[in-house]
Image (cartoon, rainbow, N blue to C red):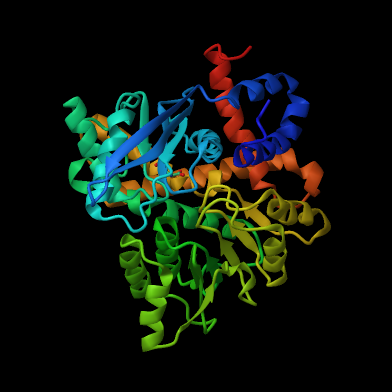
Amino acid sequence: MVLPSEPEFEQVLKEITTTLQPFLKRNPEYQRALDVVQIPERVIQFRVTWEDDKGKVQVNRGYRVQFNSAIGPYKGGLRLHPSVNLSILKFLGFEQIFKNALTGLNMGGGKGGSDFDPKGKSDNEIRKFCYAFMGELSRHIGQDTDVPAGDIGVGGREVAYLFGAYKKIRNEWSGILTGKGGDFGGSYIRPEATGYGLIYYVAKMLETQKELASFKGARVLVSGSGNVAQYAALKLIELGAIVLSLSDSTGALIARNEHEGFTTRDIEQIAEIKLKHQSLTSFNIQANANESRFVWHAGARPWTLVQNVDIALPCATQNEVSGEEATALIASGTKLVAEGSNMGCTLEAIEVFEVGRRTGKGIWYAPGKASNCGGVAVSGLEMAQNSARLKWTPEEVDNKLKNIMETAYANSYEVGKQYSSENLGEGALPSLVVGANIAGFVKVADAMRAQGDWW
Ligand code: GLU
């Protein structure tokens, strides 16, 4: 029984359970695997006390959900955000199990973090928090046990502090975190990987469908303005697409002219602002002072603000596209939706995209666990490089990332075709969410059965 106090986890469980139905109908014995896999192997909760710049004690909640280790060490990011609670980390950890399986690498699923809010904190306070957090986390992780990484609120600076803390506590240099600095074990392309990987995945979708020829001239809505959104936007610009929006928790920034979106220089400036945890309005003030190229919509998300759209890429956080917004995206001509965020679309939005296709009204949708698996995939490549004590070139890593994304796409496409045609009709593009969920689940369930976790 799932407690009703875990709404995000219940939501992901409902999504997985619903999409697994066509598979479970043909293979009812796997219902037992679903009962077992939805309970984390271990949940660690702890207290984090740290000293702020005034010398005062501050206290936060720390967590690590070690969800599944059937196909490799627990692997998944750490999120630092005031909204963090066990429901959110269980949803993220559960998603991570199947996402990691789709990369084809040996990684189990886990997630962790704290309700610590990095916004407005000094560098000194961030360091003190990271050291205090690792004081407890260091007892539970290891390069063959559990390998955390970044997520919302945790980037290169935080990973470096956490890594330094672990090394001091354990007197040991080992690849216990990914997303490290390039000079101390980090992989090339790790910062870019989630955003680039998303675009490589969408490139495969573009090849398959018939409505859009390529990225060239495609009008793209991107939400968010953190790591994933920034690198997705940069890759889109490189490929000739027009990036018409970015957003953050305070609002959405929309290009005034639909033929001229964000430039590479804009994205670089936004990256600098975001590193300082400032709002996008700081960029807008600068940009508008110069050229009046953008319109700021306070408190809004991009989905209802642009009339002609080709592709929508939610890259901010969970549940950032509602059912109504999904309907608005379809009305504005959107042909593809792919998530850079985890569970970016609500169940209602997925319903609008997927069920709508039965009557020719929906659009093709890629779930985050397939389309954003590039980040954790390059984390897996970082683990491999650390174990081998060597470093691959950027080209090598980028090529491997491309291959992984293409395989994840092929897997979700083929398995989707096997199991969604009776619902969507012959000839319809297969459901990638059905395909990704079944492909990921079967791989993990089979490994669990082989190891005696269910029978
Ligand atoms: N936080 C990222 C994700 O949601 C990456 C995790 C990792 O690299 O371990 O997949």
Q: Which quadrant holds the C terminus?
A: top right
Vertically, is 24 above or below 351?
Answer: above
Marks counted in the figure total 0
Question: Can you see residue 209?
Answer: yes
Horizontal placement of 67 versus 163: left or right? right
Q: What residue lies at 52% left-to-right and 84% top-to-bottom?
A: 257
Instruction: Residue 409: give x, y in percent of width and height.
Output: 55, 46
Quarter of the picture containing the N terminus is top right
Nearest to the observer: residue 163 or residue 442: 163
- Which quarter of the frame holds ligand 1? top left
Q: Is residue 177 visible?
A: no
Does 368 sit above or below residue 271?
Answer: above
Q: Residue at x 70, y 34 (%)?
A: 17
Which of 248/47 is in front?
47
Residue that lies at the very extreme toward the right in this rendered image: 359
Question: Residue at 54% across / 41% down in the picture?
Answer: 88
Left or right: where 62 falls relative to 415: left
Please state if 433 lies on the left or on the right of 253 as rendered: right
Image check: 300 left or right of 224?
Answer: right
Rendering coords of residue 228 (x, y %): 43, 56
Residue 422 placement (x, y as % from top left)? 81, 42
Give the image location of residue 149, x and y in percent: 36, 40
Front residue of 154/339: it is: 154
